[in-house]
Image (spheres, rainbow, N blue to C red):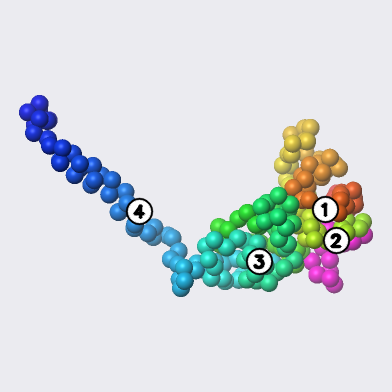
Amino acid sequence: MTTEDFNRVSRRTILGASAAICAAPAATAAVPASAAKKPGAQGLLPVTLKVNGKHLHLDLDPRTTLLDALREHLRLTGTKKGCDHGQCGACTVIVEGRRINSCLTLAVMHDGESVTTIEGLGTPEKLHPMQKAFVVHDGYQCGYCTPGQICSAVAMLDEIAAGLPSHVTADLDKVRFSDAEVRERMSGNICRCAAYSNIVAAIRDVAEQDA
């Protein structure tokens, strides 16, 4: 562009060009991604979860937490809603082998993933070793936090077995079971009845059985 051409550019031309540039991203954003799921009736999204070994199909509001999907839609009320802010651990479940606070994550984020709740670990007729140990060592009082404690404990032992360190691990090359490791790793699960020593004993019992 020459100096003469530049002098001929009017204020109206500049404003028009600016408006066109600003409008371009908005037009692009309005085009849905081909891979995105389209909302159905009333804005619900189809979600498939493998819960306790069963493939289940749900139509959910995209704002539905995994906790509410389990409790309110699937009636799996073993998983408890405590603080609903990820601070107490009562809602802990195991997703793809990892323990998470189900109140802090959306169900649609786990479409196609495997979820294990307390109901999927064992039954009254055939208890999971961790469930049995909690009974033997009286690892609960009111029992409200117990499902989250047990799910967390099961996944926590898998973390140690996989060699994943914690803040109290002295040797990162040799992650070993200890009461200190248990207390650190289970610190996100609050027991308001303060049955912590019994909980540690129950987890230690299971760890020794697996050793």
Amino acid at circle 2: Cys
Give the residue type at disc 3.
Answer: Leu
Closer to the eye: label 3 or 2: 2
Q: Are marks 2 and 1 in contact (CB under 8 Å)?
A: yes
Which badge, 3 or 4, comes first in the chain's sequence?
Answer: 4
Residue at figure coordinates x 84%, y 40% from the top left: 180
Residue receiving disc 1: 192
Q: Residue at x 84, y 66 (%)?
A: 127
Disc 1 element: loop
Q: Nearer the viewer, residue 36 or 191?
A: 191
| Tags 3 and 4 touching, CB below 8 Å | no
Depth check, mark 4 against mark 1: the one in front is 1
Is the residue marked by circle 3 packed among few (<14), some (14-19), or many (20+) residues within 10 Å? Answer: many
* Amino acid of disc 1: Arg
**Res 142 label:** 2
Residue 70's label in the rendered image is 3
